[in-house]
Amino acid sequence: MSMDNGNNAALATEADTSQNYDWEHAFRVLGELLASNGGCVSSTALRRELEHNLRMADARPLVVELKFFDPESSRERGIPLPNFRFRHLGRSFYSEERYDQELKKQEDTTTKEAKDASDEASAAAPEEPTVSRTNRQEEARLVAYAKKALEELYSSDANSDDKAFVFDVHSLRKGSSFENVDLVAVHWRSQGVCELITVEVKPSNWKTDSQSRILFDTFGSLP
């Protein structure tokens, strides 16, 4: 079998699996949970409710489908549309109105954290005179935004709700020319397997280009 035929078969299998879900029931469960919880329900709570109502052994794949649900592409795949709008952010599903409120709240929080981090970096003296206070300020500001993006990107049901999985190591150091890691993220693929992602943030005035750079390195999965 050719590689193309193999890929086509995999895509067909994925599409068949998507169409085999009881979408109408799944949307009803999600809608009822949103209505009874003020427009917000965690992915974990939704998964458990789906497993109970649909008698599924593992509803994680269905929850992932719902996280990335797109009305246009779903219609083309033969998936029925729900009679309500919903969005996903972080580890939770939101009604559209509640999503707008939560997004603004998180953006305001991130902006404040970025300003606070910049102010703290300005007050702290770098370990080496070659590391300017201005660079440290800009790095600290960018790290706050990058941290928020990583939390959104690597959130999963395998993460513990009460434990952090993205760590700002930039703020733990005074500053050095030899730093090449500002953030560390733990991507839990399952309860027993994770990946470590390191991120280096470079302000634009360290480079010749006009935009700041965020450099990612991914280590292999850890058992």
Image (cartoon, helix red, strand yellow):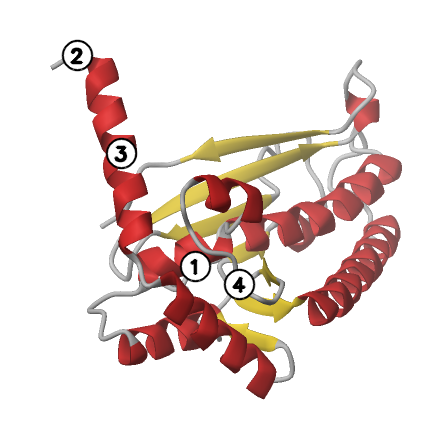
**Residue occupying image coordinates x 40% and y 61%:** 63
Q: Amino acid at mark 3?
A: Ala
Q: Kindly report which numbered mark, 1 or 4, lies closer to the viewer in this rendering.
A: 4
Q: Kindly report which numbered mark, 2 or 3, lies closer to the viewer in this rendering.
A: 3
Q: State yes or no: discs 1 and 2 in contact (Cβ < 8 Å).
A: no
Q: Amino acid at mark 4?
A: Pro
Per the model, the C-alpha gap separating discs 2 and 3 is 15 Å
Residue 170 placement (x, y as % from top left) = 65, 47
**Residue occupying image coordinates x 24% and y 58%:** 192
Per the model, the C-alpha gap separating discs 1 and 4 is 24 Å
Mark sitting earlier along the chain (4/3)? 3
For disc 4, the neighbor class at 10 Å (few under 14, some 14 to 19, many from 20) is: some
Q: Is residue 68 left or right of residue 138?
A: left
* Residue assigned mark 1: 156
Q: Kindly report which numbered mark, 3 or 1, lies closer to the viewer in this rendering.
A: 3
Mark sitting earlier along the chain (4/2)? 2
* Residue assigned mark 3: 12
Q: Secondary structure at mark 1?
A: loop
Per the model, the C-alpha gap separating discs 4 and 2 is 38 Å
Per the model, the C-alpha gap separating discs 3 and 1 is 26 Å
Q: State yes or no: discs 3 and 1 in contact (Cβ < 8 Å).
A: no
Q: Amino acid at mark 1?
A: Ser
Q: Foreground: 142 or 119?
A: 142
* Residue assigned mark 2: 2
**Residue occupying image coordinates x 51% and y 80%:** 33
Q: Kindly report which numbered mark, 1 or 2, lies closer to the viewer in this rendering.
A: 2
* Residue assigned mark 4: 82
Q: Judge whether 82 appears above or below 114 on screen.
A: below
Mark sitting earlier along the chain (3/1)? 3
